[in-house]
Structure formats: C-alpha cells, structure tokens
Amino acid sequence: MRIDRVYTRGGDTGQTSLIGGERVSKGALRLECYGTVDETNATLGLVRTSLEQSAAGLQLAPIIQRIQNELFDLGAELATPDPARRAKQPHVVQAHIDRLERDIDALNPDLPELKSFVLPGGGWTSAYFHLARTVCRRAERLVVRLAEQDDVGEFAVQYLNRLSDALFVFGRWAAWKDGRPEPLWEIVAP
C-alpha cells in the first residue's frame, strides 16, 4: 500500500468514507468503534515502548506487535459495513481468539493468586497495560452497541473481550517480572 498524501480535505465537512465508499458522519457509531480500536492500538504503542526497559519485554513485545497488527485488521473490518467486501479482506477469526487464550494460559500460572482487585500501577509497563485494557473495554462496549444495530463481523466482540482479559494478565505479569508490587484495592474507611 502506498500513501502519497496525508490530507485529502475530504473530511473537512465532518464526513468521511467507509471502506466501500459510503460517506458517513465522523460522529457515526461505526467510526467511534474503529477509532477506539485505533486508540487501543496507540496505547499498545506506549506498552511496546515501555517493554524496551522491562524484564517482560523479551516475551511480551512480540505478542504486542502481533496484537497491534490484529487490531489494525479489526479496525479495517469495522470500517467495512458490507459483509461480502469484509470477507475478502483481513479480519479477526477464531484462531486469533484462541491465540490470545494460549497467551493468557501460558502466563497466568506464574502470577500470585488474586485476593483483591488490582489497581492500575505496578510500574510503568504494568500501568500502560492497564490503560490499554480500559481503552479496549471501551472499544468492546462500543462494538457491542454497533452489533445491536448492524453487522460487525462474527468475532469482533469476542476478540475485544478476550484481548482485554489478556491485557489484564499481561499487566500483572509485567509487574511480576519487573519485581514491582501490584497495588491492590483496599476499602478506605471514611
């Protein structure tokens, strides 16, 4: 793919084109969905950069790079309302979800048993994972809303749900590998 120009002026009136050419408002729910998937991806860019200084980097950086590519495919899938056109382009499938589950299952046994909710923290890398997780959950909620009124692809919601689970485990694992304590939720008396 070659991109010669960054700007086209086509969106200056608040409209943009979906894959397939349909013009829609930039405020449309479908755009909010793939924009939030893009935001998840950008947050994972923070994670990848942080992994360069983390003991978790060797194992997690390739996984995050793979996930960023999968999120780009998901964004394109969400930007394509026509199911026939969508089927001919990259999109998330069950194998992507299965791989996330294998990633979770490989790392989770190393972690201490949870006896309370984890607060975001545990070092920069862990905190960035928790940020990515919350953005991913927002993307999931938006895609669920879109799926209630339009076709989004068979695995979009399930992929985002499993990804947010994976990001939680990755954040905990990064804190553990970096030797950082995880902040735990405590009830604060008034």
Image (spheres, helix red, strand yellow):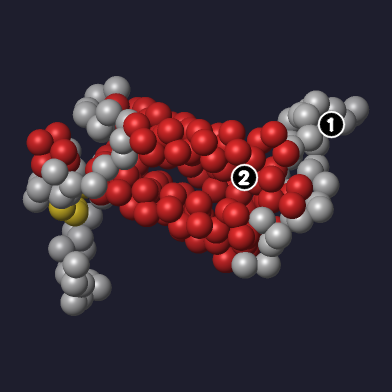
Q: Which residue is drawn at 65% across and 46% down?
A: 171
Tell me which corner region of the image, top left, top right, bottom left or bottom right, holds residue 88: top left
Disc 2: CA contacts within 10 A as few (<14), some (14-19) or many (>=20): many
Image spot of residue 10 (x, y percent)? 15, 63
Res. 27 in view: no
* Relative horizontal placement of residue 103, taking residue 93 as reference (left or right): right
Residue 65: percent from the left, percent from the top? 46, 57
Instruction: Give 2 or 119, whichever is nearer the viewer.
Output: 2
Q: In the rendered view of the protein, which quadrant contains the C terminus?
A: top right
Residue at 62% from the left image edge and 60% from the top image edge: 57
With 14 as the anchor, is 126 left or right in this view? right
Please name the amino acid that badge 2 sits on. Phe
In the displayed structure, does residue 106 sit left or right of residue 39?
right
Q: Name the residue under label 2.
A: 170
**Residue 176 vertical placement versus 108 (above, below):** below
Q: Residue 186 carries which label?
A: 1
